[in-house]
Image (cartoon, helix red, strand yellow):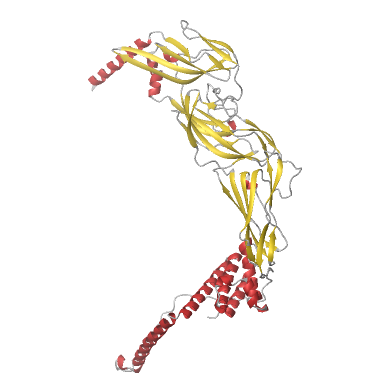
Amino acid sequence: MKKTSSHFIRNLGAVAILTITALSARATVSMQLDRSDINADEAAELTVNASGNGSNSVEPPTVAGLQFTAVSQSSQIEIINGNASSTSSITYEVTAQGPGTYTIPSPDPNAQKLILHVHVGSGAGNSSGPAQVASTPTTSTSPAQALPNPFIQGTTPGAPHMVANGAAFMRMQMPKHDLYVGETVPVDIQIGLRSGMAANITGLPTLSADAFTLNKLTDKPEQTQEEINGQPYTILTWHSVLAAVKPGDFSLAVQTPVTIQVRTAAPRMSNDASDMFNDPFFQNFFGGVTQKDITLANEPAAIKVLPLPTAGQPADFSGAVGAFTINSEISSPTGTVGDPLTLRLKVSGAGAFDRVESSMLGSIDGWKTYRAAGKFVPSDSVCYRGEKDFEQAIIPLHPGQQTVPPLSFSFFNPETHQYETLHSATGTVDVAPGSMATTTPAASPIQTATTTPPTAPTTGLRPDMTETGVAVRTLQPLYFQPGFLLAQSTLALAFIGAGFWSRRNDQLAADPIRRKRIQEFKAVHGFLAQMDSAANQRDASTFFLSARQALQHCLASRWKMTPAAITLAEIDTRLDENGENVRRVFALADELAYSGDASIDVDFPAWKQTVHQLVKETETL
């Protein structure tokens, strides 16, 4: 064991001596620019190659007006036939503070100097050039520290906003920067990650200003590839809709927390052999990488939000901003007095659909109207385009050709900068004679009595029974005793009667008229059970719907009609003034079915007793 350890130490010493010998030579440095002419808003790449002693400690040149940011670094040590060599290569991104001619000296005095010509930039909006990045990164985990973070330097709006030596960037794209209050515009929020760079998005994008709202982002970002400054990037894109909620001039930015891996800087290597393991080759081998939590943010964009004009604002304007069209229709061109029809209004287009509202028809002569209900159906993933459908129940009150007035819808068009009002066409309905009652029932004359439930019996253990049974008076066998014979005869008669009754029931069940009446009886009492359950839950809509169905089946059996044919018009024709409560049940069932108003005050116990009494009077079973 000692012999093996001594052998290992001698080999390790030999490797160290060879390495120190190879590094004792003076480092040779060469530099190369990828181009000598750039615009002020662009960047050049400077590659510094070094070999020999100190190759790992080469520093970037210092030039007034130029900034050098390391974007990649590599180094290696080779031992061939006992001869060791060390080389390193560092690539810097070179940006200028302004136009001019700059001379870049080499760390090696014998190396050739490089000349960089910087011309006037091609425009503030040019996104072809890279953004400046910081050379000394720090950690930022709070959204409030996003903008001052040294990782984030100024760029033009819409341009890639680079951080951490070009490892990632963020940008937001929107079609316009002048909005009105309530206006919505589609936006694309993008995060770019340099290929081969490890990064993890730890949160969804959020806004930095409270004057705007961001609709729900798409579930998964789209992933594409893009090349920027010759470097491939993976682009993650979220689609959403931005809405302005108050007027003023604002600076808007979107920010997202991410975790990236940043390579640590290599310490300078001294001539001491013990420092040879500080070389980047050994650091890379043992993982010279650290994680940084930073906040990506795009360059703040100047947004101007204008208030909606008050002049010329229509009376029915509900706050809808966008571009819309409307279309209306009636469920049927014919109808019957008292039977409901459905009036539909469809609003299509693009804009703030959450502010699209319509009361449709109000109180008009010849019609009874109910509250309209709307439903939005989007045609894109961010709910910017689509259509909102409104439906309203209307009931004709008079026979003949009745006119349905045109519907109107008002909105503000941000493209024309003015209010617009759209009108639908006038409709007509041919109404057949009939009648209906629209009065709300008063308190039922039938009152329920308050009863006190009986007191539950006291439960407990019964006392022990100490008494003896009845003494046997005879030794006659049980099967000869009169009581036993009577019991046997009664049992036999019961079996005979049960068979006769079963046969009679089979005969009755085979009768189609009797079978139909039994089915109707079960249906009526099934609806009554639903009505009682709805009364306990104070569900007025279900209560009167079940009550009407029970009465329809009872009256249909009496009048030899189908239950669906029993309408208010039929009741008015066949029933006299004694059928007023039946009319009230039908009228309330229709009103609650089409208005959806569950807040009506109903005396459930009184109406429950009334309906049971009506069923008892009208059923024929």
On screen, 496 above or below 154?
below
The percent position of residue 436, horizontal first and vertical second, equals 67, 70
Q: Left or right: 37 with respect to 19?
A: right
On screen, 253 above or below 103?
below
Instruction: Name the one closer to the observer, 445 or 547.
Output: 547
On screen, 555 above or below 325?
below
**Is residue 477 something that shows in the picture?**
yes
Instruction: Name the one closer to the observer, 77 or 178.
Output: 178
Corner quadrant of residue 511: bottom left
Q: Name which residue lies at 36% across and 16% down.
A: 77
The percent position of residue 198, horizontal first and vertical second, equals 45, 30
Position of the N terminus, as image quadrant, is: top left
Q: Name which residue lies at 63% across and 77% down.
A: 574
**Is residue 269 something that shows in the picture?**
no
Q: Left or right: 355 with respect to 62?
A: right
Q: Name which residue lies at 40% across and 23% down.
A: 284
The percent position of residue 413, horizontal first and vertical second, equals 68, 41
